[in-house]
Each structure stands twice: as structure tokens, then as C-alpha cells.
Amino acid sequence: MATDIKIAIVGGGLAGLAAAMKIAEAGHSVDLFSVVPVKRSHSVCAQGGINGAVNTKGEGDSIWEHFDDTVYGGDFLANQPPAKAMCEMAPAIIYLFDRMGVPFSRTNEGLLDFRRFGGTKHHRTAFAGASTGQQLLYALDEQVRRHEVAGKVKKYEGWEMMSLVLDDHQVCRGLVAMNLRSLELKAFPADAVIIASGGPGLIFGKSTNSMVCTGSAVAACYQQGAKYANGEFIQVHPTSIPGEDKLRLMSESARGEGGRVWVPKNKGDKRSPSSIPENERLYFLEEKYPAYGNLVPRDIATREIFQVCLAGMGVNGENQVYLDLTHIPAETLDKKLGAILEIYEMFVGDDPRHVPMRIFPGVHYSMGGLWVDFDQRTNVSGLLAAGECDYSIHGANRLGANSLVSCVYGGFIAAPAAIEWAQNVERNGSNGSRVYDQETKHQQEINDRLIKQSGKENQYKLHDEMGKIMTDNVTVIRYNDRLKQTDDKLRELTDRYDRISINDSNLWATMALPHARQLRNMLDLARVITLGALNRNESRGAHYKPDFPDRDDPNWLKTTVAEYSGEGPVFSYDPVDISLLPPRKRDYSHEKKETAKA
Amino acid sequence: MNTVEIHIKRRPSPDAPQHWEVFEIPYRPNLNVISCLMEIRKNPVTKSGQQTTPPSWDMNCLEQVCGICTMVINGRVRQSCSALVDNLDKPIKLEPMTKFPNIRDLIVDRSQMFDHLKRVHAWIELDGTHDLGPGPRMDQEDVMERYAYSRCMTCGCCLEACPQYDEDHYIGPQAIAQVRLFNMHPSGAMDREERLQGIMGDDGITNCGNAQNCVKVCPMNIPLTKAIYEENRETVLYGLLGWLKK
Ligand SMILES: Cc1cc2nc3c(=O)[nH]c(=O)nc-3n(C[C@H](O)[C@H](O)[C@H](O)COP(=O)(O)OP(=O)(O)OC[C@H]3O[C@@H](n4cnc5c(N)ncnc54)[C@H](O)[C@@H]3O)c2cc1C
Ligand code: SF4
Ligand code: SF4
Ligand code: FES
């Protein structure tokens, strides 16, 4: 049994840091790769909170309730055993963060306070002001720094993973990464690799995601044989603030704290919102879904807002509706939502304490990702995945505040599974070095070709075109003919990609070459998403086709699995493990019917 | 057509000299500095029509919470993602921060800030990550104070503005505020001495000249001078007691 184990982790968001902490704590070595310094990972953006059934409010919340909400909210596409395991671990995860010093909001007794989020009737979301992700990420960053000082973790910040190193038996033996300043490519041997590279929002051009969320690392694994599951399930968040460079999120906690969504009843009503009387306002979520009101799950809220705007009912006839907090005392708002209100104020200029915010849905989260088993192992031996980049847990739609907990859960499961693999795998010995040289050389050739290439196409314009067509056709409402057109367009873009010129004669710390590499990978993943959606002729969770408006369990209660081939993705389907809860119809206009505890 | 003029201080590589380049892009409402840079990199041609290299800069969250995109804009250090063109004097002047090694164009290397976090033991010494139940109960008031410090995104604005901060001479307000964050926590307080030692050397807290520039530029409104005051007191007391123990 090997004792000097080294595990490479790609990504230092919540999932990657959670895994790094566990592996270092077990006494093993970690090489930690991240495009940006890990403390600047996308997880800092999470605002609202983290779920765990602790039942501090005495509402009868339980792990089973959390599990039922998660599976029901995900429209029964999630494998149930890992979803249940996550809910079981959730309270301990929150307590651990509490011990690490996260300044969670407190009750009068000094206990952890909880707020309500979408898709549940319980106060189940622990929060640190309105910047929970930032606080949680920092707590893990601090613990990993402690292990770094102790020599257990070596960070490679500013290194981008480009590909896996696979041996002749398709076993993962490490990875090749690129130094983002010198563009040096280097192979890093490892006994196991954990991918924790986050979501792929940049495929849609503008999204609520950070700029490193390209999905490029995942696409590289896919190209090398890792399966990608449920790609078509993309969560579009109901409330974002449209911007020139990105869509900034307005957290669900705004509705959790009582925010109400409405439009004027009279189409094109030009009056200022405050001068429109109550009875001339259409609170369309509350009317249609009395049981959950403004806190219906995201896919439903998004479609309703989208449709209201399509019908020309948006504020000023534009793609926007009001999210109104003005009925809540400013002091309460500052205490509970300060950070997110500042974001709105900073980027829009209005004060949401006094003027209703104008919001519209924006691409937010990928339920799909690398296929993993219940121990976070991908189909490639020695390769694991955790966090937003894996497909487990959330099914067809993720509930708010369930992602942070799933990232940490994934990291905590992946760590021991990676160690176990590493302890038992036979090492290749000295003749193994060939595979590292080969893969490094292969990556160098790709870079060299791109650098030499001089064509008329502009990579940033190609990215814009991809983002636009993906947003138009592969988000809230999907039609088969438009999905087909989108795939044609993606193939055209892939073809034009071979004629881009990277347009930067200074290769030192250039942004151009890394972006070009990411773009190529995003195009492949975009096809997986689009064709997965084209194939799935039903509506389930975030995937909605007006031509197939109902969920179709007999034909489609199954996981989409895409595998790479030179011609495009090859699809197959896996059964979903529904061993704990029988599927039932999702209906948020009524109280959720309890199922008997299995 | 309405345009925006942008001056960028360029540096091709760490040892090359800096020079200014002027760009012009079409005006649109609601632009921020990052979207201007994105526009420029699509087609890097200067205002006078010279083909040039695209500028390099750092960005990630685009909502002022990751801290990466910090630069000096019209002479003031701040995040470029939250710098709205409509609110800035024109032409807009972009420069890299000056207190950190300049890698290329607007990119700097702030690893010294993370090294300082190591020095002051900016973490809680957990017994282990296994389930030991919740942490200590805390008063919401104390939590609110800690929350303010815990929002520090290691952006470096305070260090850029601090007249005392210059490479190795002074550890700076960011690290001192993190000492405060952890010394305020019941479990963190158990290792407060290690943290105090981290800010008591030659380059320690006594170098602060109380110029208060740091609080004025901190984008997260972190009460840095309060942290410095509190930690100064703590170190003095600790120094005294340490001396008495001898
Ligand atoms: C605005 C916003 C608000 C949110 N709010 C909430 C919330 O309140 N509650 C909730 O539960 N969820 C929320 N989410 C979702 C949640 O934040 C994310 O799903 C989660 O943070 C993802 O964490 P992660 O660890 O998987 O990856 P990330 O935090 O995205 O980290 C990815 C890491 O991978 C690295 N990386 C990527 N590619 C490479 C590569 N090729 N080589 C090397 N490194 C690489 C990056 O540098 C980074 O360190 C929110 C999301 C957004 C966008
Ligand atoms: S108060 Fe101290 S730390 Fe702040 S700017 Fe002045 S000298 Fe620097
Ligand atoms: S204290 Fe403020 S200015 Fe200084 S690094 Fe932290 S956030 Fe930036
Ligand atoms: S990009 Fe994160 S602070 Fe500006």
C-alpha cells in the first residue's frame, strides 16, 4: 500500500478546498491548481446561504424533509442515495463552518439563525449576512493555508489545467497545466486527480458566473473519455440584474426575506412604481402559486417572469419585472441583505430600499456535469469530480442554497475515495514518464499551432456569437427546430475557430491564448448541452419544451450521458436510482404532499 | 458618435519600462471599466490607428467581491469592475497598483498579502474536521463586528494607499484586521499570542503612522483604524505582561 500519496486537485472553490483540507488532514500531499488565487474563486459570489435541516425554528424540519424537497425540487431526476447522504451530512457541515469561525447570523440565544429559501416551507438556510459564499470560502481557504504552512498542500495558482495524463490503459496518472504568465506547459504526476473546476456559465456569454467559469477543464476531461451527464439542465435564475459585461445576481434571499415580484396590471403603465396602487399591481407568482408564492423553485419563477415579459407585460414593455423590497423597513434590509442591496445600488444606481428593483432571469448554474458514481468517481480510473462540475445531487433543477452544501459534501466524499484509489493503484514506475512527455508535447503542439495561425476570425466575436445563440435558444424555452439550428451554428463556429488569430504578439501574461483554448473547449460542451436538450422530448425541471409540456417518466426518467467522439457527442441513458422516494407530480400551487418515510 | 477615451499605462513584461497608450471606444450607457477593456482587446488599435497588443488585466467575479481586478483609476485605487464609466472623469486613466510587482500592463502580483496571512496565523486551529457539533455561542453584536472584518477580499487598496506600506517595511492594515477577526473569536483567541507576535516585529503594527488613508479607500468599509487601535492595545498589553513574566 502506497503511503507517500499525492493527489492533484483542479480548482480551489468550495469543493476543491474541502477536498484539499480532508486529504491534508489525513496526512497526504495535495497539489492544488487554480486559474485565480483560490481565495478569489467563484464561490465568493454566493450570497444567500447554505442549507441544512437543523430545525432551530421548531418547524418540524428534518433531514428527510430536506431530502424530499431536494428530490421533488429536482423533478425526480436526481439519484436519491447521494442526495439523501448530502442532506444527512448538511447539519455537520454547517456546524464545522461555525467552528471554523464563519460569522453566521445568530438568534437571540446566540444560536445559528436560519432563513427561508425557494422550494421549501422551512427556515433551513444558514447565512452570513448576504455574502455567505465569501465567508465559507474564506474559512476553507484559511484551513488550507494552515496545511500549506505545514507543507501538506502546494498551491499552483495562476496555472490552468489543460488536459489529463492518461496511461495506455486509460488510467489517470496526473495532468498537464499551463503557467498563465510564461505559458509554460508542465506535467504533474499524481496518484489521483479531483476535478473541482466549477460551472460553465461563460458558454452562454453573459451569466451570473465569474469569468473563470468556462467549463474548460471539464470539457478537456470529456474529450479524453470522461462521461458528461445531464448537460441540458441549465438553471436560469429568475432574478438577475442585466449588465454590459455580466448578469449580476439578485439573490433568492431577497424573496426569502419577503421580496415580492410584480408588474403593473396595465400593459405599458408608465407611472413610477410607487404611484401604482396595490390593486393595479399583478403579483403573478403569488396569484398562481398561493402555497409557495414568490418562493416557488427557480425554474418555475424564471418561466413565469419570462412569459410575462414575452406577453409584453414587462415593466415599460421591456424585459424586466419588479422585485420589491420597499415594504420592509430599511433597517431590517440592511441587516439581512446589506451586501446584495449594495451590489444593486452600485451597478444600477437606484436604492432598492426605496425603489423596487428591476430584474430579469439570467443563466446561473449547471445541474449537469461530469458523470460520477456515489463516491464521486468518474468513469476514468483515478479521476474524480466534485462541486458544480459534477452532475450528482440536483437532478433537473437545483434548490437555492443547496449548491454550497453539495460542493462541500462532494469534496468530503471525493477526498477519501481518491485516497483509497491512490493507496491501491499500482504505480507505473519509471517507464511511466513517457506518458507525461507525450501529453505535454501534444498540448505544446496545440499552443504552437494557435500562435502561428493567422486568420481573419476574431475569437472574442466567436465567443459573443456562441453566447448569444445559446442564450436565445438553449435556456428557458426550447424548441427542437431552434436547437437544431443552434447545433448547426456551433459547428460553424467550430469551423471558423480554425481561422482565428490570437492577435497578441506579446505572449507574456497574455489573455489571448488561454481564452482561445477555453473557447475551443466551450464549443464542445455547448454541443453536449444543445443536443442533450434536443433529444429530451419532455419538460422536466429547468428543461422546458412547449411542444412537450409534461414530464414523461415512462420515457425520460433517465440520466443523459454524453461521450466524446470526433463527430460530436454520442448519447446513452442511465436509469435513475429512485429507491427511496417514488416519483410524484411536482405542483407548487398546493402544499407539497408528504410522502411516507421509507 | 459618442466615444470614451481611455489611457492605459502599459508594461510588456516585468523589467520593461512603462508607457502610455490611448484608446477610444464607442460609448454605451452603463459601461464599466472592464467592459471597456473587453472592447479594446477585441480589436487592439490605439486612437491614432496604431495596431498594438491587447492590454492584460485580471478579472473574475465582476461584482466587487473577489478583489482581483483592483487598479488605479484616475489616480484612485479601486476595483475596475465596479468603476462605472458614467461616473468617471474623462479621459479615463488606468494604471496598475504601484506597491506590488507589476507583471504586465494592469496585472500585479499580490502574493505578499497571502504570505502575511500565513505569518499572522489567520485561521482557527481546529481539533479536526470531524463532527464535534456547533461552535461556541456568540452574541449577534460580536458577530456583526467580526463579519465586517471577514469581508476583506485581499484586494490591496489599503496597502496601495498607506504611506507606510512599502514592500517589507510594514505588514499593513489588511493583515492587522485579520488578527482582529480571529482574536475576537472565542476559539481563535486561544492562539492570540501567535498572532500578536506576527504583528510585533520591526515591520509590525507600530509602523502605522495613523494617516487613515487605508479606511478611506477600503471598498468593503472595513473599520481598519479600529482594528489597528484594538490590536495596538493588545500588543502593548501582551508586551507588558510578557515582560512581567520574565
Ligand atoms: C452569483 C451567485 C450566487 C450564488 N449563491 C448561492 C447561494 O447562496 N447558495 C448556494 O448554495 N449556491 C449559490 N450559488 C452557486 C454556488 O456559488 C456555486 O455552485 C459554487 O460556488 C461552485 O463551487 P465550486 O467549488 O464547484 O467551484 P468554483 O467556486 O466555481 O471554483 C472553481 C475553481 O476551479 C478553478 N478552475 C477552473 N478551471 C480550471 C482549470 N482549467 N485549471 C485550474 N483551475 C481551474 C478556478 O480557479 C476556481 O478555483 C451561487 C452562484 C452564483 C453565480
Ligand atoms: S492608518 Fe496606518 S495603516 Fe492606515 S494608511 Fe495610515 S499608516 Fe497606513
Ligand atoms: S482591508 Fe479593505 S482595502 Fe484592504 S485588502 Fe481588505 S478589502 Fe481591500
Ligand atoms: S472582478 Fe472581482 S472584484 Fe472586480
Image (tube, coloured by chain):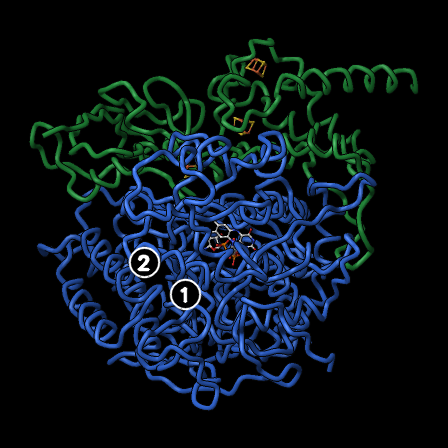
**Residue topped by disc 1:** A234
For the residues beneath circles 1 and 2, the answer to whether they share a chain is yes
Which subunit holds the residue at mark 1?
A
- Residue A161 percent across, percent down from the top left: 41, 59
**Upstream in sequence: badge 1 or badge 2:** 2
Callout 1 touching callout 2 (CB < 8 Å): yes
Please name whichever residue, B87 or A283, is drawn nearer the observer in this view of the structure: A283
Q: Is residue A16 visible?
A: no
- Rendered green, the chain in question is B
Residue type, mark 2 in image: Phe
Residue type, mark 1 in image: Ile
Specify whether tag 1 is near ligand 1 (CB below 8 Å): no
Query: In which quadrant of the rendered image does the C terminus of chain A lie?
Result: bottom right
Chain A rendering hue: blue
Which subunit holds the residue at mark 2?
A
Q: How far apart are the two marked residues, 1 and 2, measured between alpha carbons?
A: 10 Å
- Residue B75 percent across, percent down from the top left: 35, 17
